[in-house]
Image (tube, grey):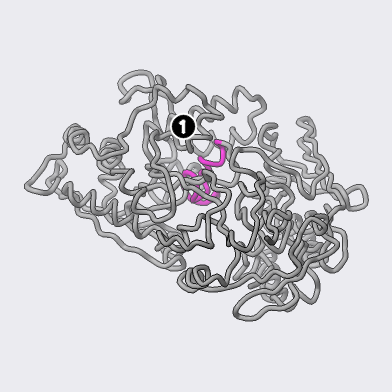
Amino acid sequence: MNWNTWAPSYPWTPTWLLLEPVQRFYADGTMSLELVEDWEYDPDSQELTVHHNEDFYWWNGDVANAADKYWYGEVARLLSPDSSRFEALHLENNGKTIVREFKDPQNPEMVQYDLGGYLGEMMRSHRDKFRPWAEELEDATTDEERLEIEERMADEMPIDMDTFIEEGLGLGPFQAVEYDDQGIYCELFDQHPYADQIEIDNLDYMLASGDAIAQQMIGGDLDFGFAPLANWIGEQEPNHLETVAPYEDTFMRKLEFMMDGPGSDHTRRLEFRRAVAHLINLQHVSDNFAPPSTPRTRQTGLPEAVTQEWLGDYTDDFLEYPTESDEEGAADLLRSAGYEQDGDAWVDGNGNAVSLELVTANWADNPARTVTDQLSNFGFEVDLTVLEGAAYNDRTEDHVGFDMTMGNHGALVAHPLYYFRPTHKHGNDLGTEDVIEDSLANGDARSPYNGKELIVEIPEEVGQEDLSGSTQEINLYELFQEWMTAQSEERSQEIARTFTWFWNFYMPGIDQFGMMSGSWGNVQNWEFNANKDWEAYRGAFRGVKRGHISPK
């Protein structure tokens, strides 16, 4: 583990236990302020002012405040000053207040989700670690100089576990005091503001592979963890373990069409993508994914709860796609696009058999095999490749050369904007910002990253099945940028509606099922007290840090 985010091996999951967030998002779309006292946004000066409280302490005894965010954020801004959203950062009020000056006007509805600045909500590092690097970057004038500093920062400042413990660089209620290859061993930190509500003096954060974790859970060696019980041990039901505080997650799982693979002649056709949506039995895909999930009944690009909360009855007239396989409907769509059946196979107008390459990370093995079987049984040739996470990341880092994949679709923040991010794999991914901007400047129709269209045409009338009537052209990247800076709720809502209608009509991906989340615990030995805190990302860590787990 390396607690420097610009170095390899940053421990993303343990941060939710050993650090503290600036703000916390919940599945129902609400949020709580943690290290923040209050905030305000001035649309005239384009300044977001965030006042930090002084309730939380680093393990070394220093107060955690805005200065920590300032120096960390300055490193991020100065490493890429041209692409940064911020014109400047200012530290005020004796280190209690940070002012983020945006280059462009911000959507007043959205700034509330950005109180944590770079890398989101977490307070990630003590100010003393990154201040020297920010001061050095102030004098850098070229990209080459900045890259050299970034590389040295990764090499020369490894915040390993020894440094993390010895210098007291965490601020959660459980202070790491020892570690080995089996786990991180913590003691209650009495300066934490919730310490007097916690009835646990020692906490061991165990490190193990999936099979070993399941064995330890069933054997009674582990007390609690995040995610539903079935995620870890399948259908086994030991008497001492239960899923506690279940809730519907803000993430969905999607089948995503890529458009620069060997089968791109097919995936680039709207009728073909819709045909695939008719072929897939979403109920079977959901059933074959061991963790609890619910098939999506409507293709809005959003989970059911987010659709209802932000769009209401707007989606009532959207195109309907089946949740169970409709082979007749799929065949009609294919024939309308010039395909025909040749024996057991389907061929296009040139006589080429439909052949697709589906590549996915190993977490999606079961749903990917279910989809592969369904498409193969209909007459498509599907080549499935399942890769370990690192190998999958390598296949998707610079260019995507296959036709379909499985991915997450969503965000910690249950707002429509986060589901259509054009630069994020959990949204409507078109590549990195520089790739998209260069492509648009060059007049390219498609992203060189994955072949997806950058500018699309959709009907003006919601529910229209084709482009025979009035249409509108959407630059997906520029419309999203406008969404980020929209100054009225009305325009923000209008853009949200446009993106959901785009997803429903154009089908860049198929949202297959929404995930049930929660936590699991040993209910024979512990009480898991009901509280909304459980309904947050890594809710088990949140629960123990706020005193919601107590001994029986």
Query: Residue 471 in the image: x percent, y percent?
Result: 39, 22
Position in image of residue 55 (x %, y %): 85, 53
In the rendered image, residue 417 lying in the magenta stretch gets the answer yes
Asked whether the viewer can see residue 232, the reply is: yes
In the picture provided, is 190 more to the left or to the right than 241? right
The C terminus - image quarter: bottom right
- Residue 473 included in the magenta stretch of the image: no
Q: Residue furthest left?
A: 343
Judged by its main secondary structure, the magenta piece is: loop
The residue type indicated by label 1 comes to Thr
Q: Which residue shows up at 74% across the image and 50% down it? A: 22
Nearer to the camera, 298 or 432: 298
Q: Secondary structure at mark 1?
A: helix
291 w.r.t. 200: above or below: above
Q: Residue 32's quadrant in the figure?
A: top right
Identify the residue at image location x=67%, y=27%: 487
Residue behind mark 1: 500
How crowded is the residue under tag 1: few (<14 C-alpha within 10 Å), some, or many (20+)? many
58 lies above or below 475: below
- Determine the residue located farthest toward the right in the rendered image: 94
Looking at the image, which residue is at 45% across and 71% down?
211
